[in-house]
Image (spheres, rainbow, N blue to C red):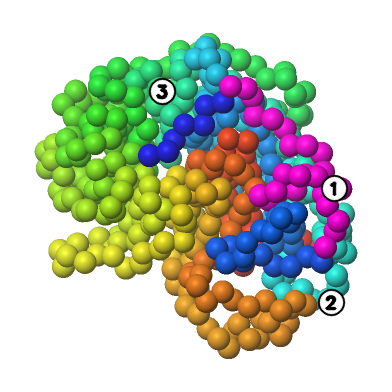
Amino acid sequence: MVRSIKSSKKAKRKKKGSKKGEGSSSSDSIPSLPAKVWQPGVDKLEEGEELQCDPSAYNSLHAFHIGWPCLSFDVVCDSLGLVRTEFPHTVYCVAGTQAEKASQNSIGIFKLSNISGKRRELVPSKSTTNDSDMDSDSSDSNEDDEIEDGGSATPLCKLVHEGCVNRIRAMPPNPHICASWADTGHVQVWDFSFHLNALTESETEVSRGASSVSNQAPLVKFGGHKDEGYSIDCSPLVSGRLVSGDCKSCIHLWEPTSGTTWNVDSNPFVGHAASVEDLQWSPTEPYVFASCSVDGNIAIWDIRLGKSPATSIKAHNADVNWNRLASCMLASGSDDGTFSIRDLRLLKDGDSIVAHFEYHNHPITSIEWSPHEASTLAVSSSDNQLTMWDLSLERDEEEEAEFKSKTREEVNAPTDLPPQLLFVHQGQKDLKERHWHSQILGMLISTAADGFNILMPSNIESALPANDA
């Protein structure tokens, strides 16, 4: 249940020349050594060593910040295309701040334009040195400059928000409508249509620090929760329907009465013995949602059946921080660093776990299925790692031998790492939340105490076209 990233000062921009990785010392002060592949969970950093990002591992990698640290954000669906593969990309997001003073908090609506990148080959086609390969990648795109500079997201519209934003979610059928949880104990619903339209029409970058700030009032401000909370979700099937859960184990149902008004049920759903950490509606059943709690349980609810759970599962031996549904598969992450995959069709048989992973050694802070690959999910942890997994993979010794024969280095697959582990992204500190972009194949956005990253690992999405420009 590790959540807070409140800082006494704004997120600092990265020093010029720094690279994404665990080390923070200047590369100029350390003699350059031959690069080698670092195996997470296997290799240890010796004194004087630091991790550096190899740009060839990514199709795209950029960093930016919105000022204060952000605990929660959401990707806003747009009208630029349902399945986008060609660079440059444009992204719209909403994010809430964790400012030092309550009066300094805001919700930011921002547009990221001209996100550059290129398709990279997993197996190098030419035998070149690591340094020359990285230099050529850097010259073909501005990725290194973006990472080092840690630029701001512009244009950016800001709405004054009373208190820190614990969680924020856009409504899938109506992306201009968003719901936010405040540490004041209030849940609020906002209409961002004016700001999104302004960003859509804006083709020129506003100067840094010139972002507009609005005192727009929320459509609804609900104070019926007994405490603050961190869980909220909007139905992807019923426009305007949402649920919100608090730290006193209560869950309230919101039903829309019009496009701008809601009826919030004052009689909560009760079934957990501790804080409700995450909620998610079923992507296929309009009346069903799942919840997870500090009590270690996951509950499945049917709003037609009353205020008690339809079923409850003892999911983990520690706090359950996240649960994500993808059709009949349920992924959950815990404070003990483990995450599990369950097949809900097997609940009646008693053993519904189809996969269980103990890779991370710190709390899971976020977990989410890929919207494009049914077997793929992304996980972030307090160990400062964002990992991607493909549950359909199994170890193949012949493929490994073929891969090693084509690479320029001796790369041995660690025997103590799961074959389902696709990718490890590092370099962000105190990772909190990440989301796949539902309209851009292979794109992930993550937030941490030191800002945001946009990344597209080169081995996640094979459908990306080559970019020879």
* Distance from Cα at disc 3 to Cα at disc 2: 54 Å
Q: Residue 298 in the image: state x and y as whole percent.
A: 25, 49
Say whether residue 235 is visible. Answer: no
**CA neighbours of label 3 inside 10 A, class few (<14), some (14 to 19), many (20+):** many
Question: Circles 3 and 2: CB distance less than 8 Å?
Answer: no
**CA neighbours of label 2 inside 10 A, class few (<14), some (14 to 19), many (20+):** few
Q: Residue 57 in the image: state x and y as whole percent.
A: 69, 62
**CA neighbours of label 1 inside 10 A, class few (<14), some (14 to 19), many (20+):** few
Give the residue type that dot 3 points to.
Answer: Ala
Residue 25 covered by magenta stretch: yes
Q: Give the range drawn in magenta.
A: 8-33
Residue 72 covered by magenta stretch: no
Which badge, 2 or 1, comes first in the chain's sequence? 1
Say whether residue 99 is visible. Answer: yes
Tell which tag, 1 or 3, sits nearer the viewer.
1
Q: Disc 2 designates what residue?
A: 127
Q: Disc 3 designates what residue?
A: 182
Residue shown at 46%/61% (left/top)? 359
Question: Circles 2 and 1: CB distance less than 8 Å?
Answer: no
Where does the N terminus fall, quadrant-wise?
A: top left
Q: Residue 280 in the image: state x and y as whole percent.
A: 33, 44
Left or right: residue 174 versus residue 22 is left
The image quadrant of residue 65 is top right
Q: Disc 1 designates what residue?
A: 29
Residue shown at 26%/47% (left/top)? 296
